[in-house]
Amino acid sequence: MEEADCYIAALDEPCRTKVNKTKINTNPPLQPSFGLQNESPGSFMKLMERDAEDRRVKRIAKEKKATALKDKGNEAYAQKDYESAVKYYSDGLAELRDMQQLYTNRAQAYIKLGKYKEAISDCEWALKCNERCIKAFVHMGRAYLELKNYNESRHFFEKIMEIEPGMEKMVKEYLTQVDLEEKRETRETNAKLEFDKGEGKGTTVPQLLENLSRPDQTPLFYCGGLEILLRAVTDCTGQTLFRLNNGFSIIGSNDLVRSCLLQKTVDAHSRDLCVSVLRLWRALCCGNDENQKMLMMCPVTKQATVHLLTSEHVAVQNECLALLCLYSHMPHGRRLAIDSLNMHMLVRNLMACILLPKQQQENAAVNILENFATEKKFHIQLRNALTESVIVPFTSILRSINKTNRQILPPLMSAIGSLARDDVIHHKLAHDPECWDAFPVAIRQCSAREYKEILYPMLGLIINLSTTPSPVIQEHAVSLCGCCQGLLSDSDGGVITRATGVLSTVLPQSSEAVQLVIQRGVVRTMCQLLKGAGQDATKYAIKTLTVCTAGSHLAREELLKSDKKLSILRHLLGSSCDELVLGNAALCLADCLQLEGIASNLLGTDIVLLLLRHAAGDAKKTAVQLNAAIALATLCRSAPRCPLSPTTHTTQAADHIVESSEEAVTGYKK
């Protein structure tokens, strides 16, 4: 809801007035006594023009005054002085009755003052000024929501989608809020009916809360009361009765309960009381969004939920993890927790549970982390604490992979990958020395122990991170590429594909790594891979091959030894629809054509037709056209007997293609 409100606040729609602005001039200019019938047409038109100009000048003056009053109203609103804001907006409307922004701004201030009908009226006037005014529909939806007219509220929020389909996410947030409010009201109504009956849970829950509010009792007394209460709040009626009878405040303000939750008392009875409270909280919040909201408003909850993850008692840790799991499963719960809890400390404690696993707690901890990692606000809060909270424990696990943590690493990789969707976090991971020092160590461990279920997501994460060039990756490129080249002989095709993917993204950052893999026979391996690879493997392999041939004469010679007619590259140029594959194949071909005698070997093949087709604009991306044109020009210069080069005119034509393509690429990059 906050994101949606911020988005709406940023809207500044132009006023497309539909209000009739015709005014009666009560002070017409004095006319000559002989009347209009004696006025010449020219004089009459001058009078009309002067009158229109007078109206325009007055309109501009009124707009200036109204805008100044609107700005004053905005300042008052920002300072939460809503009464003054309403006055300024009203004064502005007195100057200019058809200024849409004044109506929507005053409606927003009316909502803050609880004057919902007045807000709706202003929104209706705003829509007369501009029938597509998004702000008006938003404020009407919110006003009707406060008036508990849920159908009307939904109607106006859904109207936004009809006008601006791109606002679907924002509208869904508002509609979710409507659903939650309607559900809350229904449950509270049912709970009050149960209470009015004077039987069943209607009396049990209040009586139990009254007993639990008694101070200075023993931990056993409170434990027993909480266990009985737990059985009474297993459905929405019991949960709602607990909330309506001030249950959260009663439990949270109990001195002994607070002492246990904050780990100030550590005896066995206090530990049991702590477990009972956590179990009760979980039962109260299960499927009840309003209770989740209320619980996160309790100061003791916000502190205890994070700190109890480090408790020495397994039962306490398990209940705390279970409560956090409940919050993490749904977007509403995740956002409540992210807004309320200390995320830095929470993530650090979750990573501690993963780092030192016991009784399957690591599974719950990584599940919580995965769920929270889907939220953008979570990424933003972690940016400044990424190293301490995530990178240090993550790399520690990578350096010591074993049977104990083997199962937890794939979902942990997934969580880190989700965090890396944030540009700031992605950049930090790509430039962190600890990560790139740990990756080769982890690859060797997994390869030696055949932990392929870890290798696959880890290589995917490395591909993702290495798309951002960094000096750190360059420094570790030789070690990393050496490890990945060793994986190319693996029996698992998925591992081979992703190992090739790492080579394709890391090799461009290190000439030293390029020379190493060439000496170890990577060119021949890539050629073999290209003969029968899938789409992803082909994309990675041709890029790796192109990087090698671009930087090494030896790589070009190795490619020609494996494929004298360059049939693999020609096949890709003739059959692939992938622009990346086509561009790299053409570039690799151009590099190879620089070798003496290779152009003559290609006479009689379809190479000329293939290059012409791509250079002439068959490709959708100009980079493919450029690379094909370069290859074609190189071929024309290298082979005097080429069908396209009997004279210098063909070479000049090829030069022209290259120049044109370069101009196109320059324009494309701009």
Image (cartoon, rainbow, N blue to C red):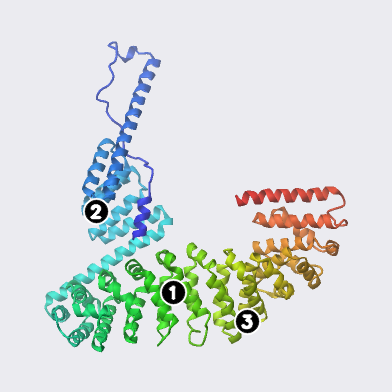
Separation (CA) of disc 3 from disc 2? 62 Å
Please report contact status of discs 2 and 1: CB closer than 8 Å, yes or no: no
Q: Label 3 sits on what residue type?
A: Asp
> Where 154 falls versus 542 (above or below)?
above
- Select label 1 or label 3 by which is in front: 1
User: Quick check: can you spot residue 114?
Assistant: yes
Please report contact status of discs 1 and 3: CB closer than 8 Å, yes or no: no
Callout 1: few (<14), some (14-19), or many (20+) C-alpha neighbours within 10 Å? many
Tell me which numbered mark, 3 or 2, is placed earlier along the sequence. 2
Callout 3: few (<14), some (14-19), or many (20+) C-alpha neighbours within 10 Å? few
Q: Label 1 sits on what residue type?
A: Glu
Callout 2: few (<14), some (14-19), or many (20+) C-alpha neighbours within 10 Å? some
Tell me which numbered mark, 1 or 3, is placed earlier along the sequence. 1
At 35% from the left edge and 76% from the top edge, which residue is drawn?
Answer: 324
Reading the image, the residue beneath label 2 is 112
* SS at badge 2: helix
At 34% from the left edge and 85% from the top edge, which residue is drawn?
Answer: 312
> Where 334 falls versus 399 (above or below)?
above
User: Quick check: can you spot residue 288?
Assistant: no
Determine the image quadrant of residue 295. Answer: bottom left
